[in-house]
Amino acid sequence: MSQDLLHNSNTEDEARRLVEQAESSMAPEPAITSLGKAQKFMHQEESPLAGDIGWKNVPLQNLPSQGFFYPEGTEITIRSASVAEIRHWSTIDENDALAIDDMLNFVVEKCCRIRMSGRPANFKDLKEIDRFYLIFAIRDYTFKNGENKLFTSVENEDGTEERVEITKDVINYFNPDDTLMKYYNSDKKCFVFQMKSGDVFELHFPSLGVMAFIKSYAKAKAQKNQQFDKAFLKYAPFLLAEWRGLTEREYDRALQESVTWSIQKISLMDKITNMLASSINPEVRYMKASGEEGTIPLSFRGGIKSLFLIPDILDELV
């Protein structure tokens, strides 16, 4: 009997304690004077992307674009390429330009993380002018102990040949014309041109997503033996600002709009797009024997595969 009373007493005490806790949890909360939950959410979103082990931040100012064409607060991080990704890279067909393009995108997609305006973004949001820099940055991070040095050949003034090591930091990727930069609009993150006729139009450096759509569009048309406007194909990458929602119907709408352009606008479009395209011309910087800096077009021994495959691997044999 005494044990039953003790058990009942303990049960009552426990029940009383639970009731008191429940009542205290139902007490009125203090008035909300700030967006506490929103602040917590923003704090989580603002945690650095490079906080995870193996990820490294890429400062926007180091990119060829210098971050000019991305929203404020954009963050880009990279990691080294894995063995599985390098194995996939080894299947690349160096005689197929589209296959090379797809493989470069594959590496960027797997080894880059992007955040724009506090939200996760897609690798397709990256500008094409930044892709090669990021590829080299991933490569340098993958072979950070110098396991796979990349070289190009330079002919000296005396006719001798010299090897120059290629890293991401010795390449000029983007050399914009000063005339173009006068029309850069920091609010819209693109170039804005106003003609004397009053016509205003914007031109954008193409994103990977826009370029992927255009290449797929042209390839599909060619495979079906369908005619398409090759002249507009030259302007389309710079006119189409967003890859999201970009369909063949939207592309055709922009194409039909271009039919109404005046001769002045066509001439200006041709001039500016040529200037934009020619500003993207990767060159390797090196020091001449005279102490002056020289440049040569970007090329390397072993072809594109040597970016992630060791070309002199036979040296590893006994």
Image (cartoon, rainbow, N blue to C red):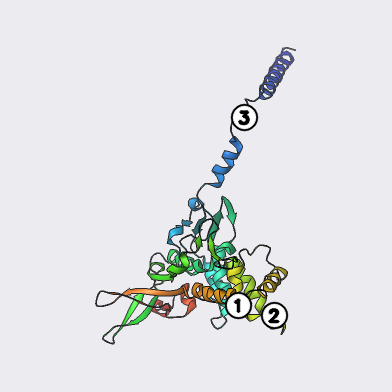
| Badge number at residue 263 | 1
Q: Position of residue 29 (x, y in %)?
A: 64, 25
Q: Position of residue 81 (x, y in %)?
A: 50, 65
Residue at x 73%, y 13% (from the top left corner): 5
Upstream in sequence: badge 1 or badge 2: 2
Q: Position of residue 108 (x, y in %)?
A: 54, 65
Residue type highlighted by circle 2: Lys
The CA span between labels 1 and 2 is: 27 Å
Residue at x 51%, y 74% (from the top left corner): 277
Q: Secondary structure at mark 2?
A: helix
The residue beneath circle 3 is 32
Can you tell which of label 1 and label 3 is closer to the viewer? Answer: 1
Residue 283 seen in this snapshot: yes
The foreground one among 152 and 254 is: 254
In which image quadrant can residue 100 be found? bottom right
Quick check: marks 1 and 3 in contact, CB under 8 Å? Answer: no
Residue type highlighted by circle 3: Ile
Q: Is residue 305 above or below residue 244?
A: below
Q: Could you tell whether 258 is left or right of 192 in the image?
A: right
Q: Secondary structure at mark 3?
A: loop
The residue beneath circle 2 is 221
Q: Position of residue 237 (x, y in %)?
A: 59, 71
Q: How many marks?
A: 3
Upstream in sequence: badge 2 or badge 3: 3
In which image quadrant can residue 212 be found? bottom right
Q: Residues within 10 Å of mark 2 (few under 14, many from 20)?
A: few
Q: Residues within 10 Å of mark 3 (few under 14, many from 20)?
A: few
